[in-house]
Each structure stands twice: as C-alpha cells, then as structure tokens.
Image: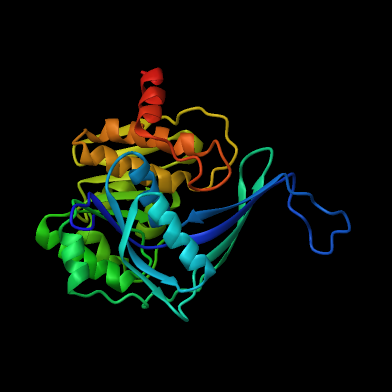
C-alpha cells in the first residue's frame, strides 16, 4: 500500500479521552459532576485528517513517531482499522504518546482540552525510505509537529511535484522555512492575523498568499470558511447539523479539502465539500468516530444546492 498512496501525513497524532459534561467542575467542588458519555478516540490534526480522507476513499499513510506503549499501539491499530498505512510509523520505547483529555459541554458542544505532549519535536529523523514514501504520493499533509522533519519532507515533496498541504493553528518558530513550500494553506481563523501581524483578515490572507501557496483557506467553525486565490475570494457557509461535539471538525475539514483537491475540483467546490465533512463529524463524541463516507457528504452538499 505504501507505494500507491494519495496522501502521506506527517504530524500530530494523539490518544484522546473524551467525556460529555453538563458543566466544568471547579477545584474542590463538593458537588460531583456526572459524565453523560465517555469514549476513547484517535486525535491530532494530521492523524484525524488522514482518517477522514481514508473514510472518503483515498489512500492514506502516516509518517511519525508514537511511543511503544499502550496508547501508541492502540493508535497504530486504529490506523490499520481506518485503512491508513503505517509502514513508516515508528513505535519507540521511551518516546511516549501524546495524550489529551477533552471535556465537551453538553449544551453547546464546546470543549475544554487538557493535553500531555510526550513526543519531542525533534524525535522524528527522516531517511531515504521516508523520502521515497513521500515522493511516491500525490499530497503531503503537515501540521507543524516534528517541524524540522516537516520542512525536509516538504522540500522532498516539492522536488517530486507532490502537493503540500499545511494545517496551521498558531504561529511557531520555523514556519518561515515551511510556508514558502506549501501549496494549500488551510488554517484556523486566528492564524493569519497572528502570523502576519496584520489585524485585517483579508489583508493577512493576501499576505500569506504572497508567500507562494495557490490557495489560502481559513476555517471559521459555525460560520463556515473563507477561501482566497490570487484572482478570487469566497465565503462558504457551514452546513447545519445537530452538534454533539466539535472535536476534530477542523481536522476533518482538512481531510475533506485534500480529497476534493485530489478530484481536481475548483477551490470553492472543495471548500463546500470540506465544510460538509467537518459538520457531519460533529454529530458524535470524538474526533474520528463521526467521520462520514463520501456518499453521505455528497448528499448533504447536494441538499444545500
């Protein structure tokens, strides 16, 4: 499978514990807060995006490091269940696996997130087999985890004509090397103004376009998303669904976006499709448990036309 992939993802993958709660407990609160539901799921921007694109029917593979521990082995097995190739995944003793605890507000689907980062950003060192793995794919998807390796991977992708997609949620050191190598810059709403220092979103997005990507897309939650190309701009509304949990919605959006671009669709159609993937994923507790198939997404999109 590793030689015939549509998408290779290099980045964050986490073991998530999620619970629905009526309210957040206070420290030393004498009144116990009862959980409505508790689940375990895979998380992380790249890890969830790969699961999303695989659920839609594309061939995906994960390149990264997880601990050789209970959580790391569980996440590896989950990738296999999701039909995500793990031939370039490293399970390393002593590395540790990122763990997150998410409390989801019962009334709104909003979240409080506690994370325990255990994998060091320099832990992943790429080799010639990784280079071949990346250059045989059609898309490389990154999120800034393992940033030195991500920059190297993006350079290899550029050499081979592989498109590079980047999920940006906040500025970090080293992005000045990575962003000029990105073809599809799909970021959370705070990112453009925070990274560029320009307070106007339109101005900030245009500044990011000047770095070289063919498209800049800003996800905006319940307001949908905005997309820019050099010669055009769109505001694409969100798809209404009954929200249980917004965890993984942005990551699912990336999976839908990559899938649509692989089909050769124009950016506005791709963004509308990705909005639908993100919305449908909000119907269940967990970042991946509600990921839809392509027919379900198409039905939601066509119902809005």
Location of residue 27 in the rendering, given as x and y in whole percent from the top left corner: 79, 63
Residue at horizontal 26 percent and vertical 60 percent from the top = 179
Q: Can residue 206 be seen in this view?
A: yes
Compared across the picture, whether 140 is left or right of 41 comes to left
Residue at horizontal 49 percent and vertical 70 percent from the top = 97
Report which quarter residue 262 is drawn in.
Answer: top left
Quadrant of image for the C terminus: top left
Location of residue 145 in the rendering, given as x and y in whole percent from the top left corner: 38, 66
Residue 110 or residue 214, whichever sits in front = 110
Q: In this view, does 4 lie above or below 69?
A: above
* Color theme of the render: rainbow
Q: In this view, does 39 lie above or below 228?
A: below
Location of residue 30 in the rendering, given as x and y in whole percent from the top left corner: 89, 58
Q: Is residue 3 above or below residue 89?
A: above
Quadrant of image for the N terminus: bottom left
Q: Is residue 157 visible?
A: no
Q: In this view, does 222 lie above or below 16?
A: above
């Amino acid at each position: 499978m590793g030689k015939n992939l549509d998408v290779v993802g290099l980045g964050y993958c986490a073991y998530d514990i999620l619970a629905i709660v009526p309210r957040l407990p206070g420290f030393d609160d004498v009144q116990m807060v009862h959980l409505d539901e508790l689940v375990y799921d895979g998380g992380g921007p790249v890890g969830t995006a790969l699961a999303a694109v695989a659920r839609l029917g594309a061939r995906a593979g994960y390149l990264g490091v997880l601990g050789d521990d209970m959580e790391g082995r569980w996440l590896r097995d989950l990738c296999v269940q999701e039909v995500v190739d793990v031939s370039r995944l490293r399970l390393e003793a002593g590395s540790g696996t990122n763990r997150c605890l998410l409390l989801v507000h019962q009334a709104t689907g909003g979240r409080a997130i506690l994370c325990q980062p255990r994998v060091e950003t320099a832990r992943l060192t790429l080799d010639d087999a990784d280079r071949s793995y990346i250059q045989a794919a059609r898309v490389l998807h990154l999120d800034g985890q393992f940033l030195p390796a991500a920059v190297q991977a993006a350079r290899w992708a550029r050499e081979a004509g592989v498109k590079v997609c980047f999920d940006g949620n906040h500025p970090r050191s080293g992005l000045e090397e990575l962003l000029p190598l990105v073809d599809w810059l799909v970021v959370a709403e705070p990112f453009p103004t925070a990274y560029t220092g320009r307070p106007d979103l339109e101005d900030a997005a245009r500044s990011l376009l000047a770095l070289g990507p063919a498209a800049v897309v800003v996800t905006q939650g319940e307001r949908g998303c905005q997309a820019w190309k050099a010669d055009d701009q769109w505001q694409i509304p969100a798809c209404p669904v009954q929200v249980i949990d917004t965890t993984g919605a942005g990551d699912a959006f990336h999976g839908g976006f990559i899938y649509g671009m692989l089909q050769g669709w124009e950016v506005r159609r791709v963004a509308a499709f990705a909005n639908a993937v993100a919305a449908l994923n909000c119907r269940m507790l967990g970042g991946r448990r509600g990921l839809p198939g392509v027919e379900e997404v198409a039905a939601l999109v066509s119902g809005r036309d």
